[in-house]
Image (spheres, coloured by chain):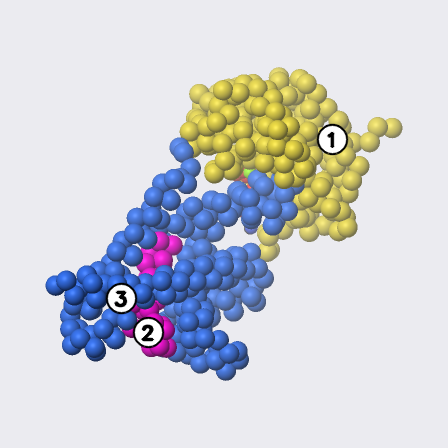
Amino acid sequence: MTEIFSGLIPYILTGLQVTLEVTVLALGMGFLIGLALALLRVYGGKASSSIIAVVTMVIRALPHILLLLLAYFAIAAVVNLTPFWAGSLSLAIISSAYQCEILRGALLSVGAGQMMAARTLGMTRLQAIRHIILPQALRQAIPAWSNEAAIVVKDSSLVYVLGVPEILRKAQYYSARTYQPFTAFIAVAVVYFLLTFLTNRGLSALERKLRTPG
Amino acid sequence: MVEPIIRLDNIHKSYGKDDILKGISLEIMEGEVVVIIGPSGTGKSTLLRCINQLTVPNSGRVWVDGVELTDPKVDINKARRHIGFVFQDVNLFNHLNALNNISIGLKLVLGMPAPNAKEKALLELKRVGLEQKADLYPGQLSGGQKQRVAIARALAMDPRVMLFDEPTSALDPELIGEVLEVMKKLAREGMTMVCVTHEMGFAREVASRIIFMEHGVVVEEGSPEQMFANPQFNRTREFLGKISELYGKHTE
Ligand SMILES: Nc1ncnc2c1ncn2[C@@H]1O[C@H](COP(=O)(O)OP(=O)(O)OP(=O)(O)O)[C@@H](O)[C@H]1O
Ligand SMILES: [Mg+2]
């Protein structure tokens, strides 16, 4: 029993930092890419909008593990990245397809009248998007985004297949060494549960804090 | 000769096969209050939007304050600063309180420093009688208050002309009066106004001219006295007779 607290947990937690880094990188880069795609989808030309629609649709139709491997080998063919960076970037690309959909919906939920009112004051389209549309759309997107964040927390475990030493891989090492797979994997399950739980809690607190009165 | 502050020359606008505006020409002098009336779907909103190029006409030219807005080389964002526009559905920025709804344009578009913008925004709120509501968000204001903030937002930009597109028709009847009072005050202060509205009491009191539009053309125009007492066309008489039936008794 003491082995769990003295051996297992400290060992698995050495992978926690990697898990958190992969998650934050995938979510953050996925957000930036997804936002750019969503803006092009809503405000860009017809051609770019249709291309993005098709690409994101294809990404969303495939298993994440398959996409991760595809992206990993595609990236490896072009640049020499460590598995950690290639994995995080791959997860970011996958997540960006979902975040693009979430943000597109949020942008469209801000009525056309808001843009018109901004333009009548003499704002440029860019100013209107930046100062009028986005602040409303991003608030609106938090609940759906929080769902996606939880998915990315869980998906960070996929970089396991690339050999990145995140918590799942650590648990696997531990179980191979001690022949105690259950203890190891249950410990990881608890960690993932806490991470998704805290992510959701944190984001709903943020949503309440940012909610417009009235 | 004094130049008109708004001049429309032979404006045409169509959506697909539908000709909405069929060659509208109009001259409005500084200080005039022009009321545009007409049946639904006639192109009144389209005409108003053609003035500030929110809708770009297919052909024809528009001048406001000496600048041709239909000139492809014109900086339309700059030109729009001084053309106030008030929408039927208000369109206050939902994520900003009343004060910031007004100050954002001052800061972003006119480059006014934040303290000055705040001061000016408060002044404009006072002008529409809402200085106590500065901190409230659109969702916390009544329909009439929202529309008054929207008017203050437009006024803050020091517009040369104000365009109103049925500013009271989405409001509960008991809230219409407060908005009309603000508009009448503005008219008396000499603001050039183009108002699409069926509030005939307002038209009678402050309009210098009433324009009756139907099917994308101006059917008839004249002073309120002339239009109410002695319209030239039967169609005008019919429509004026039906207004209170169509748009509610309070319009008289
Ligand atoms: N963006 C658009 N695309 C297609 N048709 C449009 C568009 N905007 C307006 N129309 C059409 O143009 C016609 C005139 O519309 P407009 O809104 O100018 O009429 P209106 O006189 O303001 O009517 P109302 O009194 O109902 O406000 C309508 O038939 C409308 O359906
Ligand atoms: Mg209209």
Q: Who's yellow, chain-wise? A: B
Q: Which element carries disc 2, helix, strand or loop?
A: helix
- Against B239, residue A80 (above or below) is below
Q: Amino acid at mark 1?
A: Ile
**Residue at image coords 52%, 21%:** B130
B39 or B132, which lies in front? B132
Please state the chain letter of the residue tagged with numbered disc 2 in the rendered image. Answer: A
Seen as rendered, the residue at the extreme bottom is: A77
| Residue B2 in sight here | yes
Nearest-to-viewer mark from 3 and 1: 3
- Against B149, residue B69 (above or below) is below
> Circle 2 sits on which residue?
A160
Q: Is residue A101 magenta?
A: no
Residue count near mark 3 (Cα–Cα under 10 Å), binned few <14, some 14–19, many ≥20: many
Asked if both marks, 3 and 1, belong to the same chain, the answer given is no
Where is residue B189? Give x, y as percent. 68, 18
> Circle 3 sits on which residue?
A12
Where is residue A151? Give x, y as percent. 33, 62
| Pointer 3 with pointer 1, Cβ within 8 A | no
Please state the chain letter of the residue tagged with numbered disc 3 in the rendered image. Answer: A
Magenta stretch?
Answer: A145-169
Residue count near mark 2 (Cα–Cα under 10 Å), binned few <14, some 14–19, many ≥20: many
> Circle 1 sits on which residue?
B28
Please state the chain letter of the residue tagged with numbered disc 1 in the rendered image. Answer: B
Q: Name the tint of chain A in the rendering.
A: blue
Quadrant location of the N terminus of chain B in the rendered image: top right
Distance between the alpha carbons at the discs numbered 1 and 2: 72 Å
Seen as rendered, the residue at the extreme left is: A1
Which tag, 2 or 3, sits closer to the chain's start? 3
